[in-house]
Amino acid sequence: MFNVHTHLFTSNHVPEELLKLYVKWLPNFAIKRVSTFMNSNAGNFLLGWTNRLGNEPLKRYGNFMKFGYGMNVEEQFQILKAAYPKGTRFVVLMQDFAFISDYQSIVSFDDYKKEIYHLKRKFPDILLPFHFVEPRSIGYHDNPDRLLDPIKKDYERGFCQGLKIYPAQGYFPFDYRMLSVYKYAVENEIPVMTHVSKGGSRYVKQTSDADKNILKLDGKIYQTGLPKLGWFNKDYTGRAALFSDPENYEKVLDHEGLRDLKICLAHAGGDEDFNIALDNLKLPISQHKNNWYKTCLHLIDFYPNVYMDISFSLHNPDFLEKLIKKDFILGDDELKDIVMIKKKEHRRKRLLFGTDYYMTYTEFDSSVKNLSLIEYDLWKKAENILGSELFKLISVENPTLYLKSKKYR
Ligand SMILES: [Zn+2]
């Protein structure tokens, strides 16, 4: 089986400034101190205590800190591997945080890549890294090959099996600088994974002039409408939502030659939006205004190779039981509806299993000693709810199709 959505990284790979997403008013001078403290023995001791005190949010956060501050990527991978049957393959989504904030991580993306490369050599068949794409690493007037070259090199030597993009970090997926990468992906059938949820990492840097007017894939100027951050406006989430909006992918897929791009919309729109969809189950689709879960479904229906994964969202049984089963399995009342039969037949091939390891651990009690058990329970529960037939489809057959490219079969 496959888990198409996992992460291996520690606090050394992420700029400390991302703490602002949790403590909005944290002044810059305190960031370093708080982070150093969390990384120290005293910080670990305090976390141990919060677990014993039984404070729920802190207790959950405690789990996250165990991975972020107490382990290396290989230890994280061993915990993941132990939660699955032998031979399970894992997509590991690499991420470059260099442009998300004014601060840099302790370990650069190039050095992080070396850590993952080292691990890939140890587990060549079961570890499938996805290369990160960050368009801001080149200028609009630079040779676009500068963005493509390292990706091409890593794909061709068999190190990477796909591409990861993360617009919430501060760029639009239809940025002109991405064009050669997308074209290369289409030519070689390389899968792309993108983040579609209002949670996770978000751009915490002040809006720059360069952020306000960008060039689209067609080379035309686009006014982004990105607000400036002020002392009273620290709406990182609202601003990042402009980048992450799944409707942005229409501008990518409608561009000449990119309609066949194989792209997976991770998290199915995220907790916030699928919860609204759950509350409005009885409403016809036309009345779901700008709901990201619904937009993801629309993109699957409309374009040939758009996928969706259930990662992170699968922690909520209602998401699987009431939305996924309703929208991906043919209902008894639809057995004679030819249009619906066709639609669901297509949708069933476009759903992927992934967990978002170890981001999901914030949803579970950190007093559990065997950390593999949390991951094991998560996928076993998903299998139980979805049924073995659909689960096999999304964890074996569909990922095989999604991952298959010129160099990877
Ligand atoms: Zn993720």
Image (cartoon, helix red, strand yellow):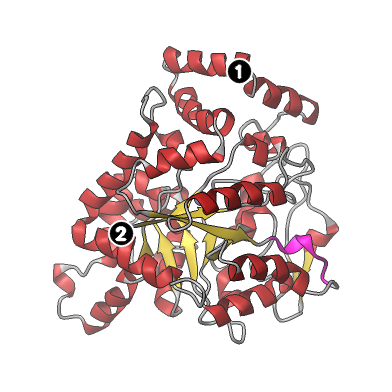
Amino acid type assigned to the residue bearing label 1 in the image: Gly
Q: Of marks 2 and 1, which one's residue comes earlier in the chain?
A: 1
Tell me the distance, in whole angstroms, between the alpha carbons under discs 2 and 1.
40 Å
Q: Identify which residue is drawn at 24% across, 55% down.
A: 386
Amino acid type assigned to the residue bearing label 2 in the image: Ile
Quadrant where the C terminus is found in the figure: bottom left
Mark 1 lies on residue: 43
Q: Identify which residue is drawn at 41% across, 16% down.
A: 54
State the extent of the magenta-drawn residues as a range: 134-140
Mark 2 lies on residue: 324
Q: Identify which residue is drawn at 64% across, 19% down.
A: 40
Helix, strand or loop for disc 2: helix
Helix, strand or loop for disc 1: helix
Q: Nearer the viewer, residue 147 or 82?
A: 82
Q: Nearer the viewer, residue 355 or 270?
A: 355
Report x, y in % for residue 283. Answer: 33, 62
Magenta residue check for 88: no
Residue projecting furthest to the bottom: 256
Q: Nearer the viewer, residue 317 or 372?
A: 372
Report x, y in % for residue 105. Answer: 72, 40
